[in-house]
Amino acid sequence: MVLQTIQTTQLDIPPGMIHLGIGQPDPLLLPLALMKNAAEHRLGHDDGSLLAYGAESGDGYFRLALARFLTEHYHKPVDADDLFVTAGASQGLDLICTLFTKPGDTIFVEEPSYFLALNIFRDHGLNIIGLPMDEGGLMVETLEERLTQHNPAFLYIIPTFHNPSSITLSTTRRERLVQLSQEHNLLIVADEVYHLLAYDTVPPQPLANYTDTGTILSIGSFSKILAPGLRLGWIQANQALLQRLVKSGLLESGGGLNPFISKLVQSALELGLQLDHLVNLKTVYGQRMVFLSAALRRHLGNFISFSEPSGGFFIWLRLPEQIDAETLLSEARQHNVGFQPGVRFSSQQSLKNYIRLCFSFYDTPELETAAGRLADVLRNHR
Ligand SMILES: Cc1ncc(COP(=O)(O)O)c(C=O)c1O
């Protein structure tokens, strides 16, 4: 019999490789003990309804606990009735595409944008148009111009600690964007999964704080603040938009999404375990970001430019114009180091001389080794 490795997680990293392309939490930061406490607490209630089909919007007590948690972090009251529970941000995006678009529709995204969201949009046969960003985030004047030429089903935006660029949309632009959405009846799908991961600053208000306009769906997720294997997230929006989600065929047949796990996470929220974990994550990610930035400057100073993020998972490196990061990646693999080439985040096949590095998955010794290997790759680049 041939012994095969049985895969148990999404990751499949060759032995010895340090893959800074992986945008996931370090396995050592996954909160196993926390979830054990939360599960013991919840299962101790001896409530069989835990295993029933769930309420379509999500369990009411879980949404209350989540609303309290978000109220603290968003500095504005969040109403539990404005929350809809998802099986993670990706599933939320997919459901939004199902209900708010049809194949052939145009949507706007930022250039660059989260590459795997682009794949979800492609699954739905959408025509994707990228809009430029600068250091202040999406260039809303360009959005305004393009709205005279197209009638997009929605704009997909990652306003805070953007993936891949880590840029945060300025307050002035947020306000203008909200105005534009009202003037043009433009639906905004705001992917705010990194909003809670500010290391030590307070980011501008999330677009979730503007959902009373009726033009915004704000997506959140426990993947970045607790654990991705829970497959748990939420959408915040006004009632008219939420009712379209709640009345979908998917929920009518299957009930609310991920009810069992949401009850365990309710305990994590109520016992204060989620808050403690988040505080720790922000410290660790902040330290890793500082460390990797310093290592990159030390090893690759002449080759690169980047801005240090104040939250999130990523460093977005600009390489000299003539370097094609996809070619560089095949050379990097031979040096046992990986990254995401910029072109994957482009809806128009550009950004070829950018790479995205992620510091959430590895601790500082690996980050140091990886920066050294990247420098070797660039020095030997043909
Ligand atoms: C911007 C963005 N949205 C969504 C996701 C996926 O989130 P989830 O695990 O909740 O599906 C990620 C994960 O990398 C992300 O970076």
Image: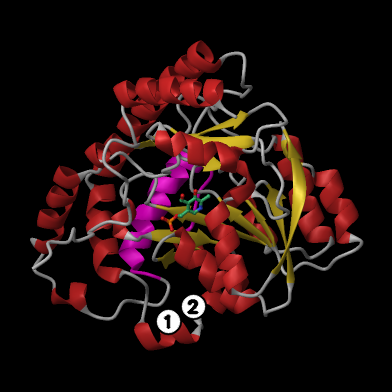
Residue 370 lies, in percent from the top left, at 40, 26
For the point 49% across and 48% down, the residue is 193
376 is within the stretch colored magenta = no
List the residue tagged with mark 1. Answer: 251
Q: Residue 198 or 372: which is nearer the viewer?
A: 372
In the depicted structure, whether residue 267 falls above or below residue 94: above
Q: Earlier in the sequence, mark 2 or mark 1?
A: 2
68 is within the stretch colored magenta = yes
Q: Nearer the viewer, mark 2 or mark 1?
A: 1
Taking the image as shown, residue 175 lies to the left or right of residue 142, namely left
Residue 175 lies, in percent from the top left, at 74, 44
How far is the residue under mark 2 from the one under mark 1? 7 Å
Quarter of the image for residue 364 reads top left
In the depicted structure, whether residue 138 falls above or below residue 235: above
Q: Main SS type for the magenta part? A: helix
List the residue tagged with mark 2. Answer: 246
For the point 54% across and 48% down, the residue is 192
Q: Do the numbered discs 2 and 1 sit on residues whose CB atoms are within 8 Å?
A: yes
Magenta extent = 58-79
